Image (cartoon, rainbow, N blue to C red):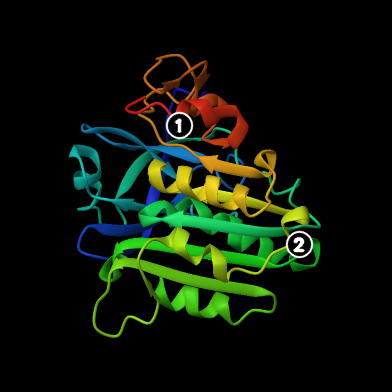
Amino acid sequence: MNAYLPREAEIVERIQETPTVFTLKMRLTDDAPYAFDAGQFNMLYLYGVGEVPISIVAGDGESLTHTLRAVGRVTHGMAGLRVGERIGLRGPFGRGWPLREAEGRDVVVVTGGLGCAPAVSIIHHILSHRERYGRLTILQGVKHADDLIWRAQYALWSQQPEVQVLLAADVAAPGWGGHVGLVTALFDRIEFDAARSLAMLCGPEGMMRGSAEGLHQRGLAAENIYLSMERNMQCAVGHCGHCQFGAHFVCRDGPVFAWPEIRELLAVKGF
């Protein structure tokens, strides 16, 4: 497929998760094959408005799911899409999560805010191939308890064997049963063997930096910590330069990086 030309996708389901967050389930209207690795992203194109990079939450061969927050011109436009309407789609792009390297190990997933969306594909893959992986620990942090989406899904995951789910909110709300404070404060409660574990982090960079340092202090090797980065990705193929991050292009060399690859860059404020 031509990486520059969008394919047509029809919206088959729309879910309003919060006042500003919504999920679009879509199917490609052509017969060309489509496959993706967990952690990759698509460029979604709203005709006459523009294009944005969005992580792939799930896909089953028949449909693809993306969760978006309405924050700009394109995503506000997509928030008005209804079932039956069509958009453009390019992808998948980028380097995904190291799920093959994680086989036989415990996996710790730490997410913040809507960073949970790119991590859902990790969880689905591990639970679909349970015999290949050890203990799965899922930590999700949000600013306000009302920002947490997929509560029923977290509850379902927590009931699976060898799965631990811990939730944190900076600001609680009535009925909140999780931790109040930073998600990194939950590290003392997780159960994992640092010598045979791998961590995957996604969310605000400050949270990921603190999480990587905290897990490393608990004995997890730096090369076994992976982060999913976000930048202003416009071409998705490493040509336009908008997403350059040091010597890397996030769209082409990421969005998933091993911590040692970008550790020094994360320490530079505003980079």
Residue furthest front as drawn: 217
Label 2 vs 1, first from the N-terminus: 2
Q: Residues within 10 Å of mark 2 (few under 14, many from 20)?
A: some
Amino acid tagged 1 = Leu
- Residue 59 shows in the view: no
Secondary structure at badge 2 equals: loop
Q: Quadrant of the C terminus?
A: top left
Quadrant assignment for the N terminus: top right
Q: Is residue 166 left or right of residue 23?
A: right
Residue 33 at x, y = what percent? 61, 41
Relative height, residue 247 to residue 19 (above, below): above
Q: How many marks?
A: 2
Label 1: which secondary element? helix
What residue is shown with label 2? 133
Q: Badge 1, how many Cα within 10 Å: few under 14, some, many 20+?
A: some
Q: Nearer the viewer, residue 28 or 135?
A: 135
Please tell me whether residue 160 is drawn above or below residue 169 in the rendered image.
Answer: below
Height in image: 252 above or below 157? above
Q: Which mark is residue 124?
A: none
Residue position for label 1 = 266
